[in-house]
Amino acid sequence: AQRVTQPEKLLSVFKGAPVELKCNYSYSGSPELFWYVQYSRQRLQLLLRHISRESIKGFTADLNKGETSFHLKKPFAQEEDSAMYYCALSGFTSGTYKYIFGTGTRLKVLA
Amino acid sequence: NAGVTQTPKFRVLKTGQSMTLLCAQDMNHEYMYWYRQDPGMGLRLIHYSVGEGTTAKGEVPDGYNVSRLKKQNFLLGLESAAPSQTSVYFCASSSLGLAGVYTGELFFGEGSRLTVL
């Protein structure tokens, strides 16, 4: 079954500390992987996707097909990074397009 | 450019009442989705549509119906609301890129908070 797992509901770090938000997935095929972010009182928006291999706001994520993981990392957390982060995957299975989200991780960056 | 617009933003219903949430997008996107967001459960797909006149069930479709009569609109209906349907509902849309290659990004509305008493 297709599934996205984010094991941490809440992650608290101090400003300037490294951050890693974990994401593991289960999918029979080659999915696209994404990270979405929801800042307070704002709508969900795309943060980054694995095919772009880009760094957005200092965040990077590497797709590890062997471990089926797509962890989000940032070397030095900032207070403005506090938000809800969702990992998601998309792909075709049996001719049906699926877009599946994990349960989300709330990141709190403490001053 | 409004993007994805949801109406209403807030609604309180009594058990058994019906209502419709409207999602409108002005980006000419082929795909549209309805999700519900609940604490500890993240975003769960209710129904989605891959084009005008088509709809499909998602992960949690029971108790909901949808229609996509126009490409820009995707309606989510609750025929007989139940307290378990108290949630925040998000609409999203995405495009099918050139030559049918999917571009990947979902564009979300601001959400509709529904309370069923």
Image (cartoon, coloured by chain):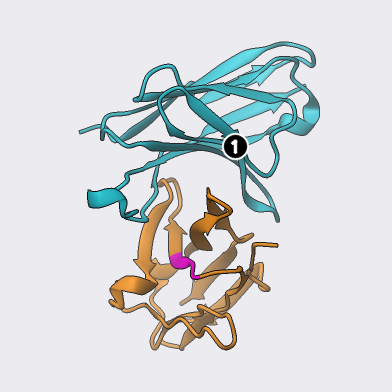
Chain colours: A orange, B cyan
Residue B18 drawn at (x, y percent): 68, 12
Predominant secondary structure, magenta span: strand
Q: Hey, what amino acid is under mark 1? A: Val
Is any part of residue A40 visible from this angle?
Answer: yes
Circle 1 chain: B
Q: Residue at x 73, y 11 (%)?
A: B17
Looking at the rendering, which quadrant does residue B45 occupy? top right
Residue B50 drawn at (x, y percent): 44, 37
For the residue pair B38 and B64, the one nearer the viewer reads as B64
Check the image and name the residue furthest to the front. Answer: A94
Check the image and name the residue furthest to the top. Answer: B17
Q: Which residue is mark 1?
A: B88
Range shown magenta: A30-34
Number of residues whose C-alpha sits closer than 10 Å to that of mark 1, classed few (under 14), some (14–19) or many (20 or more): some
Check the image and report above or below for B91 versus A74.
Answer: above
Relative side of A110 to B109, left or right: right
Q: Looking at the figure, which quarter contains the N terminus of chain B?
A: top left
The stretch drawn in magenta includes residue A31: yes
Residue B69 drawn at (x, y percent): 43, 16
Q: Residue at x 36, y 77 (%)?
A: A59
Relative side of A4 to B50, left or right: right
Q: Looking at the figure, which quarter contains the C terminus of chain B?
A: top right
Residue A67 drawn at (x, y percent): 59, 86
Looking at the rendering, which quadrant does residue A60 occupy? bottom left
Check the image and report above or below for A76 versus B90.
Answer: below
Is any part of residue B97 visible from this angle?
Answer: no
Q: Secondary structure at mark 1?
A: strand
Check the image and report above or below for B4 versus A22.
Answer: above
